[in-house]
Image: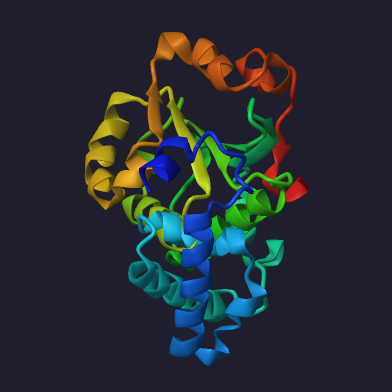
Amino acid sequence: MELVQRHEEALPSDIITHTELTKITLLRTILQTSDPSSKVQEEDDLTIRRFLRARELNVEKASAMFLKYLKWRHSFVPNGSISISDVPNDIAQDKVFAQGHDKIGRPIIIIFGRKHFQNKNGLDEFKRFVVYVLDKVCASMPPGQEKFVCIAELKGWGYSNSDVRGYISALTILQDYYPERLGKLLILNAPYIFMKVWQIVYPFIDNKTKKKIVFVEKNKVKSTLLEDIDQSQLPEIYGGQLPLVPIQDC
């Protein structure tokens, strides 16, 4: 088991170890027994493994997490996907973009915090938008890749953009229903007032996700981004060569 943990990140993401394969088979059996209607046979091994890894390869905990996911997906995304017409207000805010990939092939999305405003009609549309974005970026994964990189640009963020309930809802969806999908979250140009909101949100972030979050120093934005992203894949706004593409157009 120690060997698996030590070399896990060094292995190509589509390589499944013997230990993982054994537990994937066991998890499938448990899921099929617990809920014969779950159609777990339609899920690939990498999907099952993400839930196992999210629970430290604990089969019982992973099965509970996966069953919760299936129930949520069936009720929240009954048609199998979220369409643009389901999220018109969030799309209109023009706040999420896709562009390029990092040095190990993970697709990149950029979120502009100053463009997000709380929906007066409640959280439902924003939750659908979060699922829309995550489904989009997951569908863009190249073969053998499972994770994405997110850049959160907070320049110009103010209290009018503060949406604690929305942020916590987005984190819950990411952590509970898209486990092991986030590779890294780079937070850029965070103003002081944002940190007060961050203190409220932080307790809702699980330990695995916390390890993937990096607050980038304001005078080291480009150099930090270049550690993970080639110049050719860096957004134009950070001195790179790629234009930003709205998430709905990717």
Instruction: Point out residue 246 in the picture as x, y percentages from the top left corner.
Output: 70, 42
Q: Nearer the viewer, residue 51 or 100?
A: 51
Along the horizontal axis of the image, is 209 left or right of 107?
A: left
Q: Residue at x 57, y 38 (%)?
A: 11
- What colour scheme was applied to this rendering of the protein? rainbow
Give the quadrant of residue 21.
bottom right
Give the quadrant of residue 47.
bottom right
Q: Residue furthest right?
A: 249
Q: Nearer the viewer, residue 199 or 211?
A: 211
Q: Can residue 119 be seen at all in this image of the molecule?
A: no
Instruction: Point out residue 211 in the picture as x, y percentages from the top left corner.
Output: 35, 36
Give the quadrant of residue 39.
bottom right
Along the horizontal axis of the image, is 75 left or right of 197?
A: right
250 lies above or below 63: above
Image quadrant where one finds the C terminus? top right
Q: Nearer the viewer, residue 156 or 228?
A: 228
82 lies above or below 91: below
Q: Residue at x 45, y 77 (%)?
A: 67
Q: Residue at x 28, y 47 (%)?
A: 201
Q: Can residue 188 be seen at all in this image of the molecule?
A: yes
Instruction: Point out residue 244 in the picture as x, y percentages from the top left corner.
Output: 70, 31
30 lies above or below 153: below
